[in-house]
Image (tube, grey):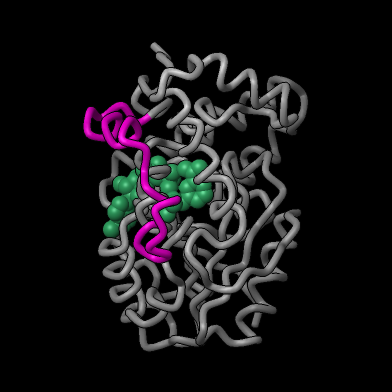
Amino acid sequence: MEIKNVMVVGAGQMGGGIAQAFAEAGYNVKLNDIKQEFVDNRLEIISKGLQHQVEKGRLEQQEFEEIMTHLTPSVSYDDAADIDLVVEAATENEKIKLSIFKELDEVAPKEAILASNTSSISITKIAGATKRHTQVIGLHFFNPVHAMKLIELNIGLTTSQETIQVVQKVGESLDKTVIMAKDSAGFVVNRILIPMINEGICVLEEGIASAEQVDEAMRLGSNVPMGPLELADFIGLDVVLSIMQTLSANFGDTKYRPAPLLVKHVEAGMLGRKTGHGFYNYE
Ligand SMILES: NC(=O)c1ccc[n+]([C@@H]2O[C@H](COP(=O)([O-])OP(=O)(O)OC[C@H]3O[C@@H](n4cnc5c(N)ncnc54)[C@H](O)[C@@H]3O)[C@@H](O)[C@H]2O)c1
């Protein structure tokens, strides 16, 4: 099966990056969100980012224009009627994702593949919301999409070999390295990374070290490019909390208990870079 037409559902930070990656690789991309202004804002961000590349001499003006012609705004799932692949990158909330997949399943061509960029929600459960259990898969990108070379393919209990092969080829066509993981909460990277971030928040909360010291300690002591608290702000504290809650619900182990300080930040609407406040101030 050849993939040409892609719909990206959710024009947030991940959806925007994913849509751009597909458009740069020559796919026709519909970028969908619940409000026209969300889609327009994201297309504007993509356009400005690419224009910056042109100014720096890293991209030709013609290439920039070509990429933008591959991106079409959408605010209706009816636009999925002619797509080959959906990549859902909407809010990390099980109820929202199940309802999106149920609706898309009714509109998308019967051979189309429905993929989710979920960080932690069961692909098998998402597949269960559709009538095409074999054609649902996790296609998990990392943030920021243009810089991160990894894609995790998350294989549901019912995902077929054919779906895996098609989506693996698509992932590689975006110049990414593709690894496979069986469907399990958090898959590989977030199962390891998010509890580490949560522990960093516990260290701050217990007054063991300041935010700056926690981050510097981890940058210098474990050779990571970003410390856990700056990374949490970058990912979005709502996303981090949601993944911890999924790990906790799935494994029922107290080691996945979300740090109370993380919960408090989310309750306060301090979600990190995207709101201007998190463990650091960005205003
Ligand atoms: N932030 C990260 O670092 C990261 C990394 C990998 C994967 N993810 C996953 O990607 C997904 C999106 O995360 P994000 O950080 O881009 O979130 P975000 O909050 O920036 O964007 C989510 C977008 O989804 C839209 N949306 C909500 N309901 C929708 C619906 N019914 N139909 C269409 N659009 C809808 C929202 O309006 C919003 O624009 C989540 O599943 C998250 O777990 C996030």
Residue shown at 54%/55% (left/top)? 191
Count of marks placed on residues: 0
Q: Quadrant of residue 55?
A: top right
Placement of 22 over or under 200, stated as above or below: below
104 and 75: which is toward the camera: 104
Residue reaching furthest to the left: 267
Q: Give the side of residue 282 with respect to residue 103, left or right.
A: right
* Residue 110, position as x, y percentages in the image: 44, 87
208 and 93: which is toward the camera: 208
Residue shown at 26%/31% (left/top)? 264
* Residue 116, position as x, y percentages in the image: 47, 64
Residue reaching furthest to the top: 283
* Residue 126, position as x, y percentages in the image: 38, 74
Placement of 217 over or under 58, stated as above or below: above
Is 249 contained in the magenta span? yes
Q: In which quarter of the image is residue 59?
A: top right
Placement of 208 over or under 99, stated as above or below: above
Magenta span: chief secondary structure: helix
Placement of 225 over or under 75, stated as above or below: above
Q: Is residue 73 visible?
A: no
Q: Is residue 88 visible?
A: yes
Is 36 contained in the magenta span? no
Q: Give the side of residue 211 with respect to residue 238, left or right.
A: right
Residue shown at 29%/39% (left/top)? 37
Q: In which quarter of the image is residue 124?
A: bottom left
* Range drawn in magenta: 248-271
Q: Which quadrant holds the C terminus? A: top left
Residue shown at 45%/59% (left/top)? 120
Q: Which quadrant holds the N terminus? A: bottom right
* Residue 78, position as x, y percentages in the image: 31, 69
Q: Give the side of residue 58 with respect to residue 154, left or right.
A: right
